[in-house]
Image (cartoon, coloured by chain):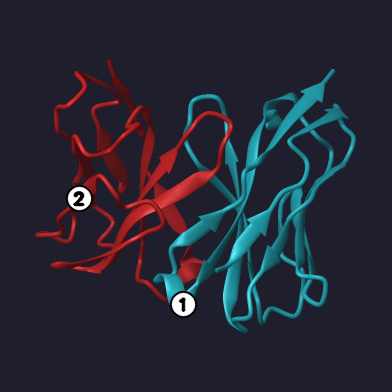
Amino acid sequence: DGGITQSPKYLFRKEGQNVTLSCEQNLNHDAMYWYRQDPGQGLRLIYYSQIVNDFQKGDIAEGYSVSREKKESFPLTVTSAQKNPTAFYLCASSISPDRVDYGYTFGSGTRLTVV
Amino acid sequence: AQKITQTQPGMFVQEKEAVTLDCTYDTSDPSYGLFWYKQPSSGEMIFLIYQGSYDQQNATEGRYSLNFQKARKSANLVISASQLGDSAMYFCAMSLLNSGYALNFGKGTSLLVTP
């Protein structure tokens, strides 16, 4: 079945370390997105990519970096510059940037805890 | 910037009753999409319903309907015949061209269905 795979489900890292969250999709979707969710809050956009080798900052990009070298992969790196990285991270994709009526598919998320 | 407002942090409803979850949005763009997602405690995002800004009729999907009042910029979700399994967080979201069609989320409403 097609879908989005986020790994790992739980991730623990020491403060000051960079960490990379994986997001892989086999839906042949053009657009991919990264969101952050804090307890009791909605999702906030970190980065998005509409096409391979191109991406744009979202509302809270500081302290994060991404790459889009392949259509199916959109990894997110949480750098040491991110002041409060402990959160739930969700990856999503859509068939193309302008076909929103087809909906968005979400991964099951990665819960990052920095100690 | 576009904004989604969900004014009900928490709602209770008795099983088999209908419930309305409020959502208002703010945008000057004539073309946009409105979405509702359900997030159970597992964290996954489950798509419920979509309404395009040019759609003439209110969207319906099974027990879910979207009460779309364009002039008032509201997109309330109506769940009919509530079930215990409907207990979850519910998020209203909007997609816009000027943000790469990335979803912009409200802070959510926590719904508890009681026997």
Q: Residue at x 84, y 38 (%)?
A: B81
Residue B70 quadrant: bottom right
Q: Residue B88 placed where, x, y %?
A: 65, 31
- Measuring 65% from the left and 77% from the top, which residue is drawn there? B53
Residue picked out by circle 2: A65
The amino acid pointed to by label 1 is Leu
- A5 shown above or below A71: above
Which residue carries the number 1 mark?
A: B97
In this rendering, the answer to whether B91 lies above or below B97 is above
Residue in the image at 24% along x and 46% along y = A64
**Which-is-in-front pick, marks 1 and 2?**
2
Circle 2 — which element?
strand
Q: Quadrant of residue A95?
A: bottom left
Residue type, label 2: Ser
Left or right: B72, with B53 as reference point: right
Residue B30 at x, y percent in the picture: 62, 84
Residue A74 in view in this figure? no
Shade representing chain B: cyan
Classify 10 Å Cα crowding around label 1: few (below 14), some (14-19), many (20 and above). Answer: some
Name the residue furthest left: A69
